[in-house]
Image (cartoon, rainbow, N blue to C red):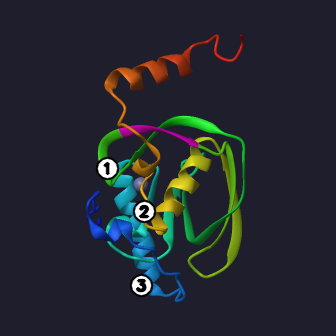
Amino acid sequence: MAIRRIVTQGDDRLRKKCREVTDFNQRLHDLLDDMKETLEEAQGMGLAAPQVGVLRRAVVIVDDDENMLELVNPEMIESSGENTAPEGCLSVPGKWGMVTRPGFARVRAQDRYGNWFEAEGEDLMARCFCHEIEHLDGHLYVEHIDHFMTEEELEAFYAEEDAPEKGKK
Ligand code: ZN
């Protein structure tokens, strides 16, 4: 395994539509292993293959139990509700923007051997599914925002989130 360099906004590879994975071979397994190691080192929530310069539809995500989920050729099959929260990206380091995403999402994907499965998640995980699938189509979350959040805006959001009275009024 090896840590790969994460490409950042401005790199052409982040704007390309990625091709489907058709060979579930050692090369794919090496890519997924490297992506997991790279994501762990970067302490991110999710990483898409184009972020390490590979234009293939593969993604790794940290799930609610802190396990790394591998999604090959992922597709959104269901989404509902809304969740608005700060969102960041390893390819746009140190910045955050407020983005509204579905509160629930279910995806269909293949594992590293080509077997189809479904995965679902709420809030942060649903956000992650949307964010990573957008990467595979050449899009970044910054397309959804009108400005990057200031320190004050970030602090205000999290202060509100932690307030014990939240949702009780
Ligand atoms: Zn990203």
Please provide percent x and percent y for residue 51: 36, 64
- Mark 2 / mark 3, whichever is N-terminal: 3
Identity of the amino acid at label 3?
A: Arg
**Disc 3 beta carbon < 8 A from ligand 1?**
no
Residue named by callout 2: 36
Q: Residue at x 35, y 66 (%)?
A: 14
- Mark 1 / mark 2, whichever is N-terminal: 2
State which region is magenta: 96-100
Nearer to us: label 3 or label 1: 1
> Residue 8's image quarter?
bottom left
Camera-nearest residue between 48 and 86:
86
Nearer to us: label 1 or label 2: 1
What separation in Å lies between label 2 and label 3 (alpha carbons)? Answer: 14 Å
Please provide percent x and percent y for residue 79: 71, 52
Labels in figure, total: 3
- Mark 3 / mark 1, whichever is N-terminal: 3
Q: Is residue 44 above or below residue 28?
A: above
Q: Is residue 35 above or below residue 83?
A: below
Residue named by callout 1: 92
What main secondary structure does the magenta stretch of the protein show? strand
Mark 3 Cα-neighbour bin, 10 Å: few <14, some 14–19, many ≥20: few
Mark 1 Cα-neighbour bin, 10 Å: few <14, some 14–19, many ≥20: some
- Is residue 152 magenta-colored? no
What separation in Å lies between label 1 and label 2 (alpha carbons)? Answer: 19 Å
Identity of the amino acid at label 1?
A: Val
Q: Is residue 149 above or below residue 76?
A: above
Q: Is residue 64 above or below residue 165?
A: below
Residue named by callout 3: 27
